[in-house]
Amino acid sequence: MPKGSEVEEFIKKEIALKERYKPFTLVSYVLVSIYLLVVGLIALYISQGIITWPTFVAVTFILGAIFVAVYGGLQVLHVSFVKKNL
């Protein structure tokens, strides 16, 4: 059975870890905003007949995959850095 001080220390570490994740909320908002902006611009080009639907689908999938990879990679690096410094 853990003692009260051990539980308090664990809770403090968890709170500190959550505080360090706050930048990733901002990163995710920025990535989603960029993604929506690009998708909107492509949709505008489709309505003008410049880009076809298959191109639109391909570009949105590729951009989505790139953003997920970047975000996931940053999170993995951040978690390893935080765990080293706790």
Image (spheres, helix red, strand yellow):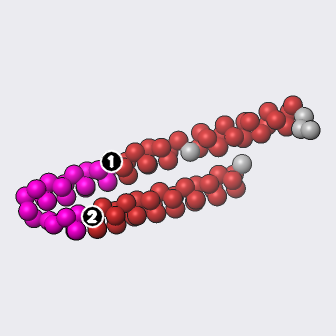
Magenta extent: 33-57
Task: Specify whether 63 is left or right of 1.
Answer: left
Q: Foreground residue, 61 or 2?
A: 61
Tag 1, which secondary structure? helix
Residue sitting at 82 percent across and 35 percent down?
A: 7
* Outermost residue, front side: 53
Check the image and report above or below for 70 versus 26: below
Of discs 1 and 2, which sits in the foreground? 2
Location of the N terminus by quadrant is: top right
Quadrant of the rendered image containing residue 26: top left
Tag 2, which secondary structure? helix
Q: Are marks 1 and 2 in contact (CB under 8 Å)?
A: no
The three-letter amino acid code for the residue at tag 2 is Val
Q: Foreground residue, 28 or 53?
A: 53
Q: Is residue 15 magenta?
A: no
Q: CA distance from mark 1 to mark 2?
A: 18 Å
Check the image and report above or below for 86 versus 3: below
Q: Foreground residue, 81 or 30?
A: 30
Q: Circle 1 sits on which residue?
A: 33
Q: Is residue 37 magenta?
A: yes
Residue sitting at 70 percent across and 56 percent down?
A: 84
Residue sitting at 40 percent across and 64 percent down?
A: 65
Task: Specify whether 53 is left or right of 33.
Answer: left
Image spot of residue 34 (x, y percent): 31, 52
- Precedes in sequence: disc 1 or disc 2: 1
Q: Circle 2 sits on which residue?
A: 57
Dot 1 alpha-carbon crowd within 10 angstroms: few under 14, some 14 to 19, many 20 or more: few
Dot 2 alpha-carbon crowd within 10 angstroms: few under 14, some 14 to 19, many 20 or more: few
Main secondary structure type of the part rendered in magenta: helix
The three-letter amino acid code for the residue at tag 1 is Ser
Check the image and report above or below for 8 versus 71: above
Image spot of residue 46 (x, y percent): 14, 59
